[in-house]
Image: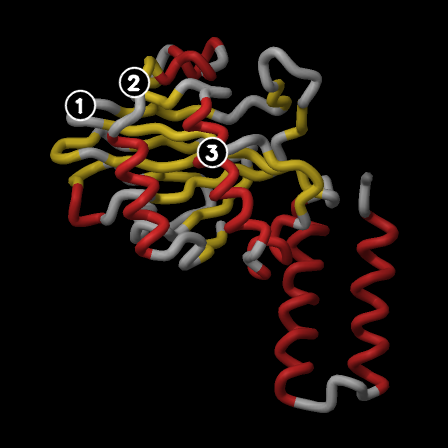
Amino acid sequence: MLVIPGVLDANQVRDMRARLDAATWIDGNVTSGHQSARVKRNRQIEEGSEEARALGSIVLDAIGSSALFIAAALPLKVYPPLFNRYGVGETFGDHVDNAIRIRRGSDFRLRSDLSATLFLSDPAEYDGGELIAEGSDKPIKLPAGDMILYPASSVHRVTPVIRGERVASFFWIQSMIRDGAARAMLFDLDRSIQELATTGDPGSAPLVRLTGVYHNLLRHWAEL
């Protein structure tokens, strides 16, 4: 579980919300698997619509500029971002995301190693609507523009909204590193290297060797 703050700034969130508020929303079960459809009540922007593609491109540009996201996810493929909203009484019960995501009408498919939720509503705008996921010791409800990254294999849910509306973008990532434990070790190693580089001599022999270990492990484990 990793919070990635400030993926979108306040102006980007405000513009995106205005465009989403004016968009056409449909039943969220259009992208659900059989089990999920039984516990899911929300709305989505139609996948592949002009607005979904335009707003999704903004999200993709933003995460592509996030060093923290790149270091943690080591992304190989990212599913085109989708957008959902939960009004009063809407919820998504316990479920696990589909292992393989296929974009309808195309040959695009990925293995869902990681799930991401990018919050587009500030917590004060709604009550309820928390993300509850295995591996987190508390409900997740982040400021607008912040994102949570978590294993797609985890059981998770969105609690019922009891006031206001919860708006978010969500998508899945296939990592170059399939194994979650290996990916976590690489993330810790990368963060350690970055910290050492800022506090010491970035050209020191020990740091160069440590950087070499990181890249050799990445080379050994990566699936492209």
**x%, y% of residue 54?**
47, 33
Say which label, 3 or 2, has the lower sequence index.
2
Calculate the distance from the C-alpha at mark 3 to the C-alpha at mark 2: 25 Å
Q: Which residue is mark 1?
A: 89
Seen from the viewer's position, the closer of residues 132 and 162 is 162
**Residue in view at x 74 percent, y 85 percent:** 202
Residue 158 appears in the rendering: yes
Dot 3 surroundings within 10 Å: few (below 14), some, or many (20 or more)? few
Q: How is the image coloured?
A: secondary structure
Q: Quadrant of residue 68?
A: bottom right
**x%, y% of residue 55?**
44, 36
Q: Which residue is mark 2?
A: 41
When the figure is inspected, residue 124 is found, relative to residue 169, above or below; the finding is: below
Calculate the distance from the C-alpha at mark 2 to the C-alpha at mark 1: 8 Å
Q: Is residue 82 left or right of residue 111?
A: left
Calculate the distance from the C-alpha at mark 1 to the C-alpha at mark 3: 29 Å
**Residue in view at x 58 percent, y 31 percent:** 79
Say which label, 1 or 3, has the lower sequence index.
3
**x%, y% of residue 173?**
60, 37
CB under 8 Å between discs 3 and 2:
no
CB under 8 Å between discs 2 and 1:
yes
Q: Quadrant of residue 128?
A: top left
When the figure is inspected, residue 180 is found, relative to residue 202, above or below; the finding is: above
Disc 2 residue type?
A: Arg
Residue 138 appears in the rendering: no
Q: Which residue is mark 3?
A: 54
The mark lying in front, picked from 3 and 2, is 3
Seen from the viewer's position, the closer of residues 222 and 52 is 52
Disc 1 residue type?
A: Gly
